[in-house]
Image: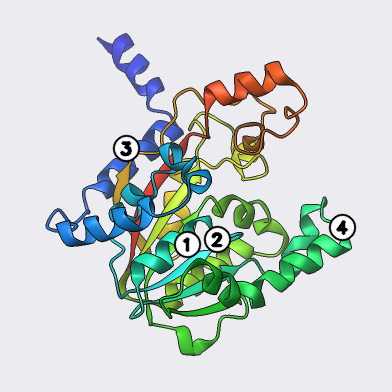
């Protein structure tokens, strides 16, 4: 009996314990919330209205299911982290409607040079994207929704306490990878906490790696983070986990010790001119992802 007990104890590693703690936190979700049929119909209509090329990634990204899980409703004020070319922006803005408002929250200007692969012109373009966000929104919808673009550092205090939802979709890893060289993650989560209304929520979709991975290899440099680490960073920033979903899980994505997330579609880094490698990556599909919903406390 003693031997079996010791064997059981060895199984409860630090990673396993983190998962158990996350499960305990998961019980804090609000079961009374119901996404209405009217909201579901409105969201599905917006998703279905896009062109076929844009919808090609829907099977992996599940935009309607994701926004419903994050409890986004028409008329809300939403902040979207790193909106990029506006794949999600198009859906969010048309769904929120004219009574809604959207903020594009970009990485701080000085963070772009730290990536190491952007030339001066590329850095300049990405810095300019912040000011261009309202024009990107205007291209995606004609409903007159209010739109403003800021970096996490430049978001004015007037925004504090006005936001219903913040969406961080595949954008957290870069904030974390440079945390020790600028505290970008700490600053971003503090700003997110500030701008949210009381009990406002943050929806996170993030490339996820096994809990057994060593911390240094799961710090975002490869695009992946551990779910337990994400939960801890949000709890330290004044949030609680209220729900989680496996809707974006992909058990075929099992990265090797040096594999980066961008080897997979749609990027296919290093494989676009190698048909067999590209085929293998496409068979895996898009990355394994965690889907978490946090509430400001």
Identify residue for label 2.
Answer: 86
| Quadrant the C terminus occupies | bottom left
Residue 151 shows in this picture:
no
Q: Earlier in the sequence, mark 2 or mark 4?
A: 2
Identify residue for label 1.
Answer: 90
Q: Position of residue 174 (x, y in %)?
A: 63, 53
Task: Using residue 28 as the reference point, say whether residue 266 is left or right of it.
Answer: right
Viewer-nearest residue: 178 or 273: 273
Identify residue for label 3.
Answer: 20
Q: Earlier in the sequence, mark 2 or mark 3?
A: 3
Disc 1: CA contacts within 10 A as few (<14), some (14-19) or many (>=20): many
Residue drawn at x 82%, y 50% is 117
Judged from the image, the secondary structure of the residue bearing numbered disc 2 is: loop
Whole-Å distance between the Cαs marked 1 and 4?
A: 29 Å
Residue drawn at x 45%, y 65% is 237
Judged from the image, the secondary structure of the residue bearing numbered disc 4 is: loop
Which of the two discs, 1 and 4, sits closer to the camera?
A: 1
| Quadrant the N terminus occupies | top left
Which of the two discs, 2 and 3, sits closer to the camera?
A: 2
Residue drawn at x 77%, y 53% is 115
Whole-Å distance between the Cαs marked 3 and 1?
A: 37 Å
Judged from the image, the secondary structure of the residue bearing numbered disc 1 is: helix
Asked whether the beta carbons under mark 3 and mark 1 sit within 8 Å of each other, the answer is: no
Residue 24, by quadrant, is top left
Q: Residue furthest bottom?
A: 158
Label number found at residue 119: 4
Judged from the image, the secondary structure of the residue bearing numbered disc 3 is: helix
């Amino acid at each position: 009996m003693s031997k079996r007990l010791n064997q059981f104890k060895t199984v409860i590693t630090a990673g396993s314990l983190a998962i158990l703690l996350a499960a305990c936190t998961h019980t804090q979700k609000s079961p009374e919330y119901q996404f209405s049929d009217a909201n579901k119909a409105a969201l599905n209509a917006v998703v279905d209205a896009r062109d076929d090329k844009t919808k090609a990634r829907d099977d992996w990204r599940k935009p309607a299911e994701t926004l419903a899980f994050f409890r986004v409703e028409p008329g809300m004020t939403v902040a979207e982290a790193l909106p990029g070319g506006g794949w999600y922006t198009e859906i969010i803005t048309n769904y929120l409607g004219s009574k809604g408002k959207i903020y594009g929250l970009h990485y701080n200007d000085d963070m772009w040079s730290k990536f190491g692969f952007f030339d001066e012109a590329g850095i300049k373009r990405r810095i300019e994207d912040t000011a261009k966000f309202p024009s990107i929104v205007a291209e995606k919808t004609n409903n007159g929704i209010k739109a403003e673009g800021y970096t996490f550092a430049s978001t004015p205090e007037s925004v504090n306490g006005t936001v219903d939802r913040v969406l961080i979709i595949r954008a957290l890893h870069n904030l974390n990878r440079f945390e020790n060289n600028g505290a970008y993650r700490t600053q971003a989560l503090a700003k997110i906490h500030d701008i949210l209304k009381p009990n406002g929520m943050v929806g996170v979709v993030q490339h996820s790696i096994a809990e057994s991975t060593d911390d240094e290899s799961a710090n975002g440099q490869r695009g992946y983070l551990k779910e337990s680490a994400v939960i801890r960073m949000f709890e330290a920033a004044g949030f609680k986990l209220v729900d989680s979903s496996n809707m974006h899980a992909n058990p075929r994505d099992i990265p090797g010790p040096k594999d980066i997330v961008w080897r997979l579609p749609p990027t296919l880094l290093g494989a676009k001119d190698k048909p067999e490698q590209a085929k293998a990556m496409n068979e895996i599909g898009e990355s394994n992802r965690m889907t978490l919903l946090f509430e400001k406390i």
